[in-house]
Every structure is written in C-alpha cells, then in structure tokens.
Image: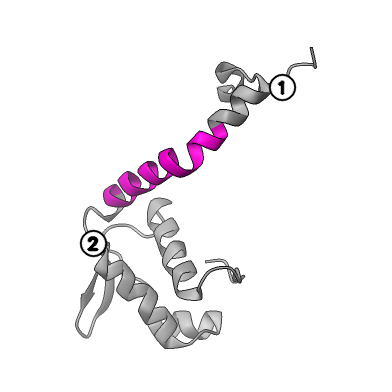
Amino acid sequence: MDREWNDSRPIYRQLRDRVVAMILDGILAEGDPLPSVRTVAAEYRVNPLTVLKSYQELVDEGLVESRRGRGMFVNLGARRLLLKAERRKFLSEEWPSIRDTIRRLGLDVKELLAEDAEPEEER
C-alpha cells in the first residue's frame, strides 16, 4: 500500500480504496486475511480506529468478513462485486469525458488499442 495520503479525502476512505485496489489487482485473493488493524496503524502511522473504520466499511459492503478472534478476511465473490461496481462507476463517471476527448482529438480506436502504435503526424 502507498504511504502517501491525499488531503482531499478522509484517510479511512483512502485505506478502504487501497484494500479494494489490492483485491482487484489480485494481491488479496478471496479468503485471504487482511493485515491486522494494529499492523496497518503502526506501519502507516494512523489511529487504529481509522483503520477499523475503513475495514468496517468493507464489511458493510459485503467485501470482507470479520471472524471473531481471527481477523478480517476477503469474502468469496468480493472481486466479482468490485469489478461490477468499478465498471459501472467508470462508465458513468469517467468514460464520457474520455470518449469526448477521443472524439475532440480525432483519435482512432485501433490506434489507441495498438500496443506499439506511435501517434500519427499532425495533419
């Protein structure tokens, strides 16, 4: 996890988003334990209650389960739920702006998708 914090958003939300990214990236798999609240708090120098709040949000979303005395674990199906939600969020919040920029610049989809494509010379 990144150790830098963005001042525009609460730290507990940033922690939550980092765990979500770890699940989406496959760093945390279904059934894996989350790092303990104490470990995260000490490593990132944040209040344990901040870490607990971020973890509780993940529990409330059904992505993580708390096992009394054992810790927090990634739920089965968490990655699938996240992919569905993140795709919906991307398509509604980010894609319209990206699509407009592509059109505005006259870019070709094939050119964008080609790995080794170099930008066309100005026309």
- The percent position of residue 12, horizontal first and vertical second, equals 45, 74
Would residue 22 be found to the left or right of residue 58 on screen?
A: right
Disc 1 crowd, CA 10 A, few/some/many (<14, 14-19, 20+): few
Element marked by disc 1? loop
Q: Which residues are magenta?
A: 80-98
At 50% from the left and 74% from the top, the residue drawn is 11
Disc 2: which residue? 75
- The percent position of residue 103, horizontal first and vertical second, equals 60, 23
Element marked by disc 2? loop
Q: In which quadrant will I find the C terminus?
A: top right
Q: Nearer the viewer, residue 75 or 12?
A: 12
Q: Are marks 2 and 1 in contact (CB under 8 Å)?
A: no
Q: Is residue 82 magenta?
A: yes
Task: Give the residue type that dot 2 points to.
Answer: Asn
At 23% from the left and 61% from the top, the residue drawn is 75
Disc 1: which residue? 118
Residue 59 visible in the current orientation: yes
- The percent position of residue 66, horizontal first and vertical second, equals 23, 75
Task: Give the residue type that dot 1 points to.
Answer: Glu
| Furthest residue in direction top, as rendered | 123
**On screen, 110 above or below 74?**
above
Q: In which quarter of the view is residue 20 placed?
A: bottom left
**On screen, 97 above or below 35?**
above
Q: Is residue 108 magenta?
A: no
Q: In which quarter of the view is residue 68 placed?
A: bottom left
Badge 2 or badge 1: first in the primary sequence = 2
Would residue 123 be found to the left or right of residue 70 on screen?
A: right
**On screen, 16 above or below 46?**
above
Q: In which quarter of the view is residue 60 placed?
A: bottom left
Q: Nearer the viewer, residue 64 or 39?
A: 64
The Cα–Cα distance between marks 2 and 1, rounded to whole angstroms, is: 42 Å
At 79% from the left and 16% from the top, the residue drawn is 121
